[in-house]
Amino acid sequence: MTIRNPIDILTRAAFVGAIALIISSCAAPDAQHHIVISTREEKLALLNRGNMIAVYPVSTSKFGLGDWPGSSCTPLGKLEIAEKIGDNAPPGAVFKDRRRTGEIVAPDSPGRDPIVTRIIWLRGQEPQNANAFGRDIYIHGTPEERNLGLPVSYGCVRMSSNDVITLYEMVGLGAQVTIVDAPLNKVVPDLADGTQIASTGRRGIMGR
């Protein structure tokens, strides 16, 4: 029987882990999907290769727009999906410091307003939103689904648990996110020419 050196085993495990990290970091960014968020209308549009496939109600900041450190504002401009957190978490799973607490909160639970279900962490690509990643600006689930469509967040973009799960499964790291202070039909061609094809309600995605 051969006795292997524990140090060799640990070294090999570390090497394998490093290789896995390198491979994952080299994955091609998602150039297929584009998220457009209107703070004016409190809506999020998902585009696939330029074609709109869904519109979701959201909530952006009740403190207005901006990106200065220490603010609770929603940043404008071009960003990208930097990290995705929450694979396979059940709807309503509570996150604190991006870690699951083990608690699950039902929609519209009285007095509860944690981050739930999924976290899509954004990184700014312009001077006007350069602090977004450090400020922990996310697209995330909220139990306060009754308030979707209203500006009630502390800087993040809130979605219902069902909607954020759908979005999370469709978009990948590197996907472009654009946040605008304008109606969606000013920046999304499908809406501008009257060919809106999908929206979401309490029953999920619906065709039009």
Image (cartoon, rainbow, N blue to C red):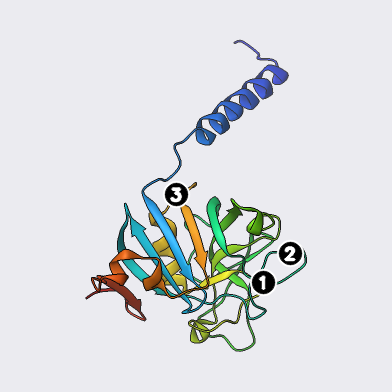
The amino acid on which the numbered mark 2 sits, given as a three-letter code, is Trp
| Circles 2, 1 touching at the beta carbon (< 8 Å) | yes
| Residue 98: x %, y % from top left | 64, 59
Identify the residue position indicated by label 3 in the image. Answer: 172
Asked whether residue 85 appears in the rendered view, the answer is no
How many numbered circles does the render carry?
A: 3
Q: Which disc is residue 100 wearing?
A: none
Q: Nearer the viewer, residue 161 or 201?
A: 201
CA distance for labels 3 and 2: 27 Å
- Which residue shows up at 74% across the image and 64% down it? 68
| Circles 1, 3 touching at the beta carbon (< 8 Å) | no
Q: Earlier in the sequence, mark 2 or mark 1?
A: 2
Identify the residue position indicated by label 1 in the image. Answer: 73
- Which residue shows up at 57% across the image and 25% down it? 16
Which residue of the protein is positioned furthest toward the bottom in this rendering?
A: 110
Left or right of 189: which side holds 107? right
Quadrant in the picture for residue 185: bottom left
Q: Secondary structure at mark 2?
A: loop
- Which residue shows up at 50% across the image and 32% down it? 26
The amino acid on which the numbered mark 3 sits, given as a three-letter code, is Gly
| Residue 204: x %, y % from top left | 33, 74
Quadrant in the picture for residue 19: top right
Identify the residue position indicated by label 2 in the image. Answer: 68
| Residue 43 to residue 109: above or below | above
Q: Nearer the viewer, residue 123 or 139?
A: 123
